[in-house]
Amino acid sequence: MTDFVIGDWRVFVGVTLVLGGLACVASGRAVARAWRPPALLLLYGLLLAAAMRFLHWSLFQEPLFAPSAALIAYAWSLFAQGGAWLVAHRARMRRQYPWIA
């Protein structure tokens, strides 16, 4: 069943969860450090999910337009980016405005 949804689970864990997750954390932190709104993460998450699907297709011959795998990659990118944005934004707020906290 998982072959139909995500392909090989080892490839999914390596490319989507680890490699894509690290890229998403980096982009979430970058958006927060630049004082950009978190709504920008929706666009960046879409681009990163497309990049993850491209890596699956180009390196491991998995289907490029697999809707369920693309939705899982997009959800994971939003989760990783959102968490990183929140942590980085809170740290920046505490550092810049110490009298608020």
Image (tube, grey):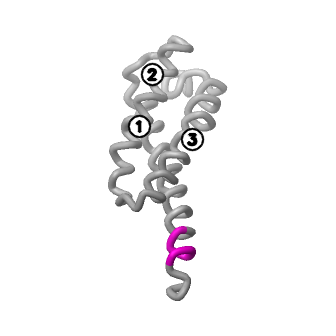
Position of residue 55 measured from the top left corner of the image (x, y, whole percent): 50, 21
Magenta region's main secondary structure? helix
What residue appears at the point 49 percent right and 14 percent down from the top-left corner? 58
Chain part drawn in magenta: 92-96
Mark 1 → mark 3, Cα distance in angstroms: 14 Å
- Toward the viewer: 63 or 27? 27
Which secondary structure, mark 1?
helix
Mark drawn on residue 54? 2
Mark drawn on residue 93? none
Q: Nearer the viewer, mark 1 or mark 2?
A: 2
Mark 1 Cα shell of 10 Å, populated few (<14), some (14-19), many (≥20): few
Q: Amino acid at mark 2?
A: Phe
Position of residue 81 measured from the top left corner of the image (x, y, whole percent): 49, 50
- Of marks 1 and 3, which one's residue comes earlier in the chain? 3
Q: Which residue is mark 3?
A: 21
Taking the view exactly as shown, the residue that stands out farthest to the front is 96
Position of residue 36 measured from the top left corner of the image (x, y, whole percent): 37, 58
Q: How many marks?
A: 3
**Picture layout, residue 21 above or below residue 52:** below
Which secondary structure, mark 2?
helix
- Of marks 1 and 2, which one's residue comes earlier in the chain? 2
What residue appears at the point 48 percent right and 51 percent down from the top-left corner? 30
- Of marks 3 and 2, which one's residue comes earlier in the chain? 3
Is-magenta flag for residue 62?
Answer: no
Mark 3 Cα shell of 10 Å, populated few (<14), some (14-19), many (≥20): many
What residue appears at the point 54 percent right and 39 percent down from the top-left corner? 23
Q: Which residue is mark 1?
A: 71
Q: Quadrant of the C terminus?
A: bottom right
Q: Amino acid at mark 3?
A: Gly
